[in-house]
Image: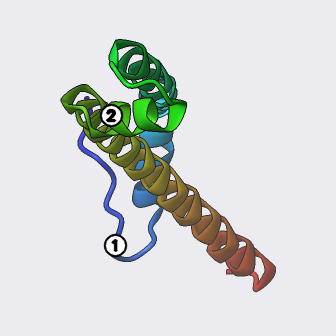
Amino acid sequence: MRPPFQISGPITQQRAEKATEWMVDNAVRIAEAKAHRDRCENRLRVVKALGMKASGEKSAAAQEREAYASDHYQQAVDELFDRTKDHEELIAKRDAARAVIEVWRSINSNLRGAGV
């Protein structure tokens, strides 16, 4: 994989090109991160349901409390946190790459308008 574009620094054509390359190179990675995050969100419901089913409690509220307190549920929450963090980081980088490209376009448009 190519080195990532720089998020900070002057906006240059080279930087805009690297930002574009990063977006293209990481499109599938972003989609995969979103899919993992969605899977983890769904897994929370499954872990809760299994915890409630395994509970010896009679009331739904007590079963739910046991399910939420289980190690399996905590592991699922931790996994969701990690996947959400990964996905959001990629989204933030994609947004930064878009911003670099848009600023570079604006600069070049202004230069063309000024006859430079």
Reading the chain from its start, which is encountered first: label 1 or label 2? 1
Q: Which mark is residue 71?
A: none
Looking at the image, the residue that sits furthest to the front is 58
Secondary structure of the residue carrying tag 2 is helix
Location of the C terminus (image quadrant): bottom right
Q: Residue at x 52, y 28 (%)?
A: 38
Q: Residue at x 50, y 38 (%)?
A: 61
Secondary structure of the residue carrying tag 1 is loop
Residue type at mark 1: give it: Ser
Q: Which mark is residue 66?
A: 2
Give above or below for 42 relative to 61.
above
Give residue 80's position: percent from left, percent from top.
36, 37
Q: Residues within 10 Å of mark 2 (few under 14, many from 20)?
A: some
Q: Residue at x 52, y 30 (%)?
A: 60
Looking at the image, the residue that sits furthest to the bottom is 114
Q: Could you say which is closer to the camera, residue 53 or residue 93?
A: 53
Read off the residue under disc 1: 8
Based on the displayed image, in which of its 4 quarters is residue 114 positioned?
bottom right
Residue type at mark 2: give it: Glu
Mark whose residue sits in front, 1 or 2: 2
Task: Specify whether 110 is left or right of 60.
Answer: right
- Whole-angstrom CA distance, mark 1 to mark 2, is 47 Å
